Image (cartoon, coloured by chain):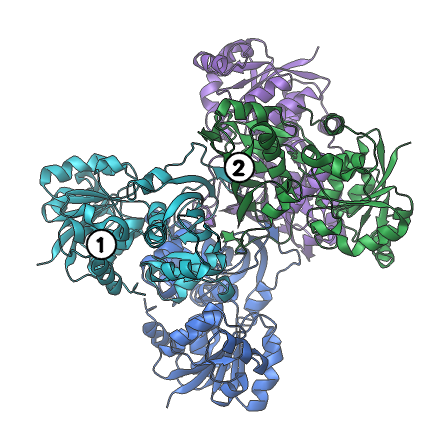
Chain colours: A green, B purple, C blue, D cyan
Amino acid sequence: MKIRVGVNGFGTIGKRAAWAVSKQDDMEVVGVTKTRPSFEARNAIKEGFPLFAACAEDVTEFDKAGIKTSGTLDDLISKCDIVIDTTPGGVGADYKPKYEKAGVKAIFQGGEDHSIAGISFNAIANYHESWGASFVRVVSCNTTGLCRTLYPLDKAIGIQRVIASLVRRGADPGDKKGSMLNSIEPALKLPTHHGPDVQTIMPWLKIQTMAVVTPTTLMHVHCIAVDLKREAKEDEVLGVLSKSPRVRLISGKDGVRSTGQIMELARDMGNLRGDMMDICVWKDGIKVTGNQMFYYQAIHQESDVVPENVDCIRAMCKLEQDPLKSIAKTDKAIGLAK
Amino acid sequence: MKIRVGVNGFGTIGKRAAWAVSKQDDMEVVGVTKTRPSFEARNAIKEGFPLFAACAEDVTEFDKAGIKTSGTLDDLISKCDIVIDTTPGGVGADYKPKYEKAGVKAIFQGGEDHSIAGISFNAIANYHESWGASFVRVVSCNTTGLCRTLYPLDKAIGIQRVIASLVRRGADPGDKKGSMLNSIEPALKLPTHHGPDVQTIMPWLKIQTMAVVTPTTLMHVHCIAVDLKREAKEDEVLGVLSKSPRVRLISGKDGVRSTGQIMELARDMGNLRGDMMDICVWKDGIKVTGNQMFYYQAIHQESDVVPENVDCIRAMCKLEQDPLKSIAKTDKAIGLAK
Amino acid sequence: MKIRVGVNGFGTIGKRAAWAVSKQDDMEVVGVTKTRPSFEARNAIKEGFPLFAACAEDVTEFDKAGIKTSGTLDDLISKCDIVIDTTPGGVGADYKPKYEKAGVKAIFQGGEDHSIAGISFNAIANYHESWGASFVRVVSCNTTGLCRTLYPLDKAIGIQRVIASLVRRGADPGDKKGSMLNSIEPALKLPTHHGPDVQTIMPWLKIQTMAVVTPTTLMHVHCIAVDLKREAKEDEVLGVLSKSPRVRLISGKDGVRSTGQIMELARDMGNLRGDMMDICVWKDGIKVTGNQMFYYQAIHQESDVVPENVDCIRAMCKLEQDPLKSIAKTDKAIGLAK
Amino acid sequence: MKIRVGVNGFGTIGKRAAWAVSKQDDMEVVGVTKTRPSFEARNAIKEGFPLFAACAEDVTEFDKAGIKTSGTLDDLISKCDIVIDTTPGGVGADYKPKYEKAGVKAIFQGGEDHSIAGISFNAIANYHESWGASFVRVVSCNTTGLCRTLYPLDKAIGIQRVIASLVRRGADPGDKKGSMLNSIEPALKLPTHHGPDVQTIMPWLKIQTMAVVTPTTLMHVHCIAVDLKREAKEDEVLGVLSKSPRVRLISGKDGVRSTGQIMELARDMGNLRGDMMDICVWKDGIKVTGNQMFYYQAIHQESDVVPENVDCIRAMCKLEQDPLKSIAKTDKAIGLAK
């Protein structure tokens, strides 16, 4: 029998997570929620996902807009084994008591604090910590991106210290509100939360982060300086990254020099929504001198955590013990396999 | 036997046109050309399109990059019944003698002048003018967009005069060079070429255009003021547009208020590359007072001309006499049918 | 004795209006208000403008930040003959009863409705309507820009009808929040308020407007199509505009092709804050055919209304009967004279 | 007698350098050059700077545009003691033989390689190296910014190692061409040239840099991580920076959180062209833990090197032996004094 999954919040992450779950053979989507009758709500139904109103009061609005709902969030919860909570950052905490009371498991996203669940998740780095857990947080897009490359490097070569500057996009492409037009704005509170957030997954890692936001919509770019535990060569590092799951080596020489060109590559690859779920590391932007390594990576904030949510379900529902097998299964089903 | 189509220039339009042709049952892609071994060249091969070097001299570069070519443009031409020339604006004119000498038909794009072929094409407005022709120009994205809504309005209600202001995007999403950052720049030479360009399709139409360029990458937006030949109501106009091929009515009330949100809708619809080949007219942005009509439409500059190229092949190769049947066939094959 | 002017709201318009008033010899700034201890508040004091807290409750915050206030808005009002209300759009209406009760005159800005005062003001077009009035609204930057060129054209040649498309900037350069990143968004409610707003100044003018917003910060650009009452030539039109106050003819041939380049010109001219209080019309972007005229103009949304506020004070306080003399006096004092 | 200064290239840097020189009492501008009759050329004359055509062939174009020239570059050189070469990056090298032949000193800008002069200049860090020299390069805006804060920190506390990520603006506000719209693009060649460039001034400093470019026009932002030679406190660091010339401490708490808001502050300060010649360091964006320090700074690429050019003249022409006295004199004359 398939694990029954509900998705609370059919927005940027929710709609992608629902799609990814629906492609797996060991889980199914029993419904998704939406607060307003937008085009995304209409689309949920077109994609075959039963639509539930987030609150009972919202039902009238859906009715007025001619969109059929299958009940409310409470109804959805009653049909689920597990909920993927993709409500806006900080809102998940309000829903937790509801899930608890109903006795369903729940996955929160990186907009919530680690403390909401006490366990944070990244498939390659700490899959087993979530084994059988009731509540888990899948870390944010940026933290996921950092774990995907730093964990394999740490395992293969050893990392002494990381200094990363995150150059963030200002909004998602369809967002109504974004960062200041024509401005660069630093995150003044230092160190930024990204370092400690990585440490919820890799507590032993010494990492410090700074961040600025820029008026773009496509991807985050990380400038990462790593002190390795020993000397290495670029070839060795490239070897490690080329074998790491959900990491893609790209090349300026192929005409992929910017986030806009990565997104063009993703569109040409035929990816649904033009998404790029892999972390993209520029091959020709890696430099290793002695034990010092420098590299750039680009993070598709809308999609990189999507396969992590699928693996997290497998860990929490004890569907698969081997993280690499879960990753391979997830990725094959959604066309992400290397 | 299928019509054999070559695509000269596998860039923004070329790669989409190749895909659209490959989906039809009465034509096939026999090859595409590229000048440099970029990721787009690699992708052509992944998609199963034989790759030809634009010039003999380019072959070495492809070899060095480990990309297999099937010959040069001359080889490709010798295999074709018709070439879709999607080389950069103004370059098509240089290739025309080659096509002529080889005795193959050719379709040029809107970056070329009308005089390159003497016939310009829009499927709904003047399909028959291209019947059996050797050389035809498919008009630009903006002109295509204007014809798609103005022709049906003119036919159903009658148009006395059009004044349109085109708010252009500054570059395509993957373009290396674009318009000035953080600036709005008017097209000072008035009237802009768009009005006369529409008149290559609808010579009887009185239309004057102005244009500005803005630092965005997603779509053009047209502000259109129409003096109709008689009074009308919004309902009548909506009725006309809702029945017009390749015109989509969208609504701010559904959360689709901007070009970013239209592109998000296109991604959610599962369209390849997140394209929106329909011209999008805002339902709640139409105003009719007496015989005066005002409306906004958004044009996806990367893709709206793609189905026009397919229909143009059918007209030039005498595959289908009825434009509406060709349009329906094209659209069904690429998932664009209403 | 000088007219005593208070400025309620030392933001984008307020700080410029205070400066412009301070440069005149028949009026003086007795104080300005601010709600929060920002750098703009510090700057008010550096510029020598007594600073008043908008509310009594705000005083503590200023104290904490070490910024000395001279009292509250009520104290300021008691020292004034007239208040320039430059509070955010819609907020002016809340303050009106306060001004009324204190018996001071007040000027509102274009963010308020015409009904707040019953009289709207543009120096060149309807100066005398505000003669001796207690409450007047200076129209918005866009409406001011339209009046500055349309009124002289109407007076000299006669206008039958205007269709204007406004391409708006998304935010001021220092604004925290702006329009959607990388998107063009039309103003769906048609006709937009700009046409009726011009008619509060020129009620006889037939004008219809559309508008889109773009992610830029520098200036609005208007695409204007005018049906004149008779045939004209470009030279005649250029002659009219070259003599119109606060209209500047610019030229793409001089390297001024975009809003960014106009702003660069303004900086090079040594204008305070790099402002451009003139409406800029592209000489080489004017086309006249028979009785049809097309032109582009750029509007510096932060500053074009500033001299209008000064003239409005003169009309309301009966300081000068001749609008052209007031305009000349204002402009000379702030370095704007032709 | 005043030192006679010519400015070759009246563009972004040149026009500002000419202005700054003209404000000093020990030097004067004898002329500036321009290649084309743009608005900047007209402005040179309005500002009282004799205008020279870059080449003899350009004179006709100026004549046609009605702009009076005082001769050609050769004529200008014959009147100078020293030339500030502000021609585009890489072009200065072509002019060097001309200067050499004429026996005039010359200052090049950061777009040239260090080797053009063998000496690079920053006023606070290595003033004396240029004493009496014939050819000197003033380093680029970014390198100047790094030296202005790192040199004082190194002198006061000692620096062990620096890792800096530079988030660059994509173009100057009036530039015709800029970086990719809506994209972030890393500088793939690592380490970027900025580190070695700082070492032309401070050869002992261990510094590594990464860089990305973003589609903005206002300022660069640096994310800087410093390993100090000993433990320190934020107060000590703030004390050092607050006393450093041409460094300004700004604060998010005052509403100055982004580059757009810094530029707004500069405009409010009444600075010519709204420039900010100081390097701006966010007070509330400094973090010191043990011997590790993190901070952000913003660099106004159009203007920060301007006072350095003035000081460089003083060093090369032996006008003032004490760098701090030259800095103070320069800054007082242009309104930059702390």
Viewer can see residue B305: no
Q: Nearer the viewer, residue A193 or B8?
A: A193
**Tag 1, which chain?**
D
Residue found 51% across the figure and 25% down from its top: A254
Local packing at callout 2 (Cα closer than 10 Å; few below 14, some 14-19, many 20+) is some
Determine the image quadrant of residue A206. Answer: top right
**Quadrant location of the C terminus of chain C in the rendered image:** bottom left
- Residue C57 lies in quadrant: bottom right
Where disc 1 sits, the SS reads helix
Chain of residue at mark 2:
A
Query: Is residue D236 depicted above or below C257 in this figure?
Result: below
Taking the image as shown, residue A331 lies to the left or right of residue C124, namely: right
Q: Percent x, y for residue C156?
A: 42, 66
Same chain for the residues at labels 2 and 1, yes or no?
no
Q: Nearer the viewer, residue B115 or D221?
A: D221
Q: Quadrant of residue A320?
A: top right
Asked whether A2 or B322 is in front, the reply is A2
Cα–Cα gap, marks 2 and 1: 45 Å
Residue at mark 1: D310
Q: Amino acid at mark 1?
A: Val
* Residue designated by label 2: A160
Assign a secondary structure to mark 2.
strand
- Type of amino acid at the residue the image marks with label 2: Gln
How far from the left and from the top, in percent, is residue C263? 40, 56
* Total labels drawn: 2
